[in-house]
Amino acid sequence: MRRSSSTWPTRSLAVLAKDIKSELRTRYAVGAIVMFAAVTVVAVGFSLGGIALDTNLQAIMLWLSIYFASAAGLGQGFIKEEEAKTSLSLRIYAPSGAVYNGKLLFNLIILTGLGLLIVPLFALLIGLNVVSYSLFLTILTAGLIGLACTTTLIAAIVARAAVKGTLFTVLAFPIILPLLILAVKGTQKAMSAGARFSDGLGELQGLSSYSVVMLIAGMLLFDYVWND
Amino acid sequence: MRLVIDRVSKSFRSRNVFRDISAEVRNGQVLGIIGPNGSGKSTLIKITASLMRASQGKVEFEIDGKIINGPDIRPYIGMVSPDLFLYDELTAFENAVFFARMSGLRLSDTRGLFDEFGLSGREHDLVRSYSSGMKQRLKLLIAAQRNPALMLLDEPSNNLDDAGKALVRKLIDGRQGITVMASNDKSEVQDAAVIIDLAHPLPGGSR
């Protein structure tokens, strides 16, 4: 068979396409995330019993819900490969960079879906008093990108451990904490009275820097994590 | 092209699996690995593929004057092994196309390969619905489509009927490059240029 001039973006997209197809047929990650997101928000909503949260608490609760829902599903990309024992085939046939990029893109898509589910649900059941929508959506997007960059690398590390599910949440939390703090602060600013987009520029810069650092760290470290 | 296994030993904690195994094969040759269950045949294959580290010694693959070792060897490998699994939730064709894309291959010949490997007509079935023999044929197809410089076959005739076993023979006989084949069945590797017998390793490791 002849070789094509297949480059790393096409190989990364092939990993993504394989994961999407696989996910559509098994609902492995989406099922866990949707269930966790819905249960968390509904449980918080009902336990508040109609008591209105102030905007600071709304931002905290929103990001905690996003974090725990994503922790329930984002690790699955690599964990599933280990559990189904397909990781050996991937190691033999797929370049590690394509695997990392493909899984990262897959996590980004899953997180976008999570954002689209959890924000309206949260607004409906708990309340979100957003003042600057542009700032809110930009902070949300930057936070989700940072979350995807971080969780992809941690999932690759955790996937080969014996207690995968628990370890993922525990190991991810201290690493994601700076991101959560910045995302919560940015979201609080988007909800404060008279908020403008420029109010959250500091948090946006912080979130962007965090994402870039995690992305570069992931690209540099993944080879060692995957091949060792 | 040359594969050198140089005084490779492997132990798991205090248990020695094998010690000081050495062998060298060149382009067009087959290296046979035989031995009873638990003698370390699959372990030696994994060490060759850099999927496992040797406790001592090294494996080097030389191609076009370049010496390659560690994970860099993998783009040159096609592998069939009981430890290597395919995606059950994808069809056989989707599996073949995915692994072809990962290897940077054109897909025009993939359909033809299904015919050659006796899977034609079932290529759009989920792998989950395949028998163990059909899965083994698909693993052989995926390894063969890469036309690898180094083919690693760990018990390639597992679960195969007579036609499947003939397919393995044909695959090995018609190959360029180096083939490493591990088997419980001595007759399967009788034509190998070099044999490593893990039940009775000779000084130096091979015949």
Image (cartoon, coloured by chain):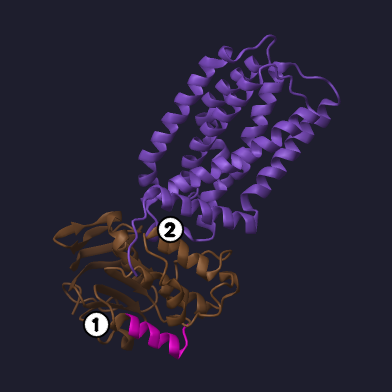
Chain colours: A purple, B brown
Residue B85 seen: no
Q: Is residue B82 left or right of residue B11?
A: right
Residue type, numbered disc 2: Leu
Q: Which callout, 2 or 1, points to the residue nearer the camera?
A: 2
| Residue A11 in the image: above or below residue A197 | below
Q: Which residue is mark 2?
A: A90
Dominant secondary-structure state across the stretch colored magenta:
helix
Judged from this view, the residue extending furthest toward the front is: B108
Q: Is residue A128 visible?
A: yes
Compared with residue A9, is residue B119 higher up or lower down, i.e. above or below? below
Q: Which mark is residue A8?
A: none
**Left or right: where B5 falls relative to A81:** left
Which numbered dot is residue B192? Answer: 1
Report which quarter residue B171 is drawn in. Answer: bottom left
Query: What is the quadrant of the N terminus of chain B in the image?
Result: bottom left
Instruction: From the viewer's side, name the closer residue of A34 and A161.
Output: A34
Q: Looking at the picture, how far across and down is residue B23, in whole percent?
A: 19, 71
Residue at (57, 72) in percent of width and height: B124
Same subunit under labels 2 and 1?
Answer: no
* Secondary structure of residue under mark 1: loop
Residue B66, quarter of picture: bottom left
- Residue at coordinates 39% horizontally, 88% vertically from top-left? B166
Does residue A160 show up magenta in the picture?
no
The C terminus of chain B - image quarter: bottom left
- The residue nearer to you, when weighing B17 against B207, is B207
Q: CA distance from mark 2 to mark 1?
A: 29 Å
Q: Which residues are magenta?
A: B160-171
